[in-house]
Image (cartoon, rainbow, N blue to C red):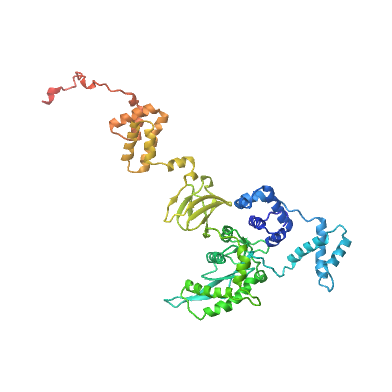
Amino acid sequence: MANTTISMSKIRKILRMYTNGRSIMSIAAQADASRNTVKKYLASFKESGFSFDEVNALNDKELEDLFGKAKERSPNSRMQAMLRCFPKVDKELKRTGVTRQMLWEAYRKEFPDGYQYSQFCFYYTQWQARVNPVMHIDHKAGDKLYVDFAGQKLSITNRDTGEIIPVEVFIGILGASQLTYVEAVMSQQKEDFISACEHTLHYIGGVPEAIVPDNLKAAVTKSNRYEPTLNETFEDFSNHYCTTILPARAFRPRDKALVEGAVRIIYSRIYVPLRKSVYHSLQELNAAIHELLEAHNNRLMQSRPYSRRQQFEEVERETLMPLPVLRYELKKQFHATVMKNGHVSLGPDKNYYSVPYRFIGKKIKLLYSSTTVEAFYHYERIAIHKRTKGLHRYITDKDHLASTHQFVAEWNPEKFLSWAASIHEDVRLYIQHILSRRHHAEQAYRSCIGVLGFARKAGNERLILACRRGLSYGMYSYKTIQMILEKNLDQYEESLFANELTMPEHDNIRGEDYYQ
């Protein structure tokens, strides 16, 4: 649609294909965008001065700020006039003897300022591809990997109960060499589907520029002829392997005719031999499949003096992108609201992970794998933690807490003793007695905070004298120091000879003889 921004994932596809040396016409055809749209985003990319790796490292929000403000111009009157002629051109070309050259000459007669013949043919080809897309596809080496599930299932048998368990069969095939990969999996769920796709990439030893899946839920969450919505986990998988996902259109088997043909061949070359034996596990079944698969890939192709494997080694292997060092780690999603304590609960684990305190009350998305937990808010990653096993544990990054909460989180005996020692040794001794006499650590910490706070209120000297007085009393609490300071007992000096004073005489005093 005019004057709208295409999706961020499509922009990444366009830039990736351009960086890989694809022509603008090829990019436009594969990205399902006009040539002018591709030119527009490539011009913005060049003007930005960034490399592809730098742009690809941006999150979707940053990428939208960089490219999202570009607007497509509506076709000018010259273009509109030519487009109105194309239905007539398409109809006339079906007549015997009519050529594009003849129709272009008739077009220029009516529109003297119209397009030249080469541009006329180019735009007509684009228009024809939109209205009648059936055509022969010439597969480029290293370009596409087609993946799908076979319609017919295989099965394994439970060794103990004899139960027959049906299993799905995944098939992947490279476009140029037709090198094929087959694997049995338990289901068509995204975990099994993505795992099978990864095994395919490692089997062929490289990464093609695009993967073409069917519109199954594991790959596409919302089917659309022009811009399908990809499953986020599958898209994350493609980003990890630096490839592009190009879903086939729904109900268009010609878009994936190669893998459809591979399925038919696999039925005869793998299914038939497998049904002669019984397999008790996926491992046994896949071992047998692998043996038959190698025979299939090494078999000479019909009417050709070479096999799929030979063609792959000679033509396609060197065109594939290298595999990343680390394998993809499957991530799952969980949505939750940040609690008032700045933590969010990961439901499956019943553990709590911190996020920056400014997101308290916000609804965020958690992506978690077997080792990590990532928190996202509006495409922006706001926190990452190592995943912790166990129940009801709090995993906290101190940088996520507000300043007051950070202070509380750092409470420990060493902190208070160090603080007290910086004032005076007598203060440290008094704090040490408080810490040793409280049954609950937090209660002792609060008393320590109160006592040490008097350094700011009354000054270091009075606090030192008050702690010294408190030590002589043998009373260790916040209220003891408070009482000493309020009654100015820290200023009181005892007389060295107070015990030598005689008892004053008084009628009410009985005297020492009374007790004889």
On the image, the x and y values in percent for residue 61 come to 62, 50
Q: Residue at x 40, y 27 (%)?
A: 459
Q: Percent x, y for residue 385?
A: 48, 51
Question: From the viewer's perspective, is residue 400 above or below residue 326?
Answer: above
Q: Is residue 83 visible?
A: no
- In the rendered image, which quarter contains the C terminus? top left
Q: Nearer the viewer, residue 478 or 137?
A: 137
Residue farthest to the right, as pictured: 109
Question: Residue at point 65% right, 71% down?
Answer: 257
Q: Residue furthest bottom?
A: 276
Q: Which residue occupies the foreground of this view, 93 or 252?
A: 93
Vertical placement of residue 387 versus 485, above or below: below
Instruction: Tell me: residue 507, above or below residue 84.
Output: above
Q: Residue at x 39, y 35 (%)?
A: 419
Pick the residue in front: 166 or 291.
Answer: 291
- What number of labels is visible? 0
The image position of residue 318, as x and y in percent, is 61, 63
The answer to which of 405 and 426 lies nearer the viewer is 426
Picture residue at 63% right of the left edge, 67% below the top = 315
Residue 450 occupies quadrant: top left
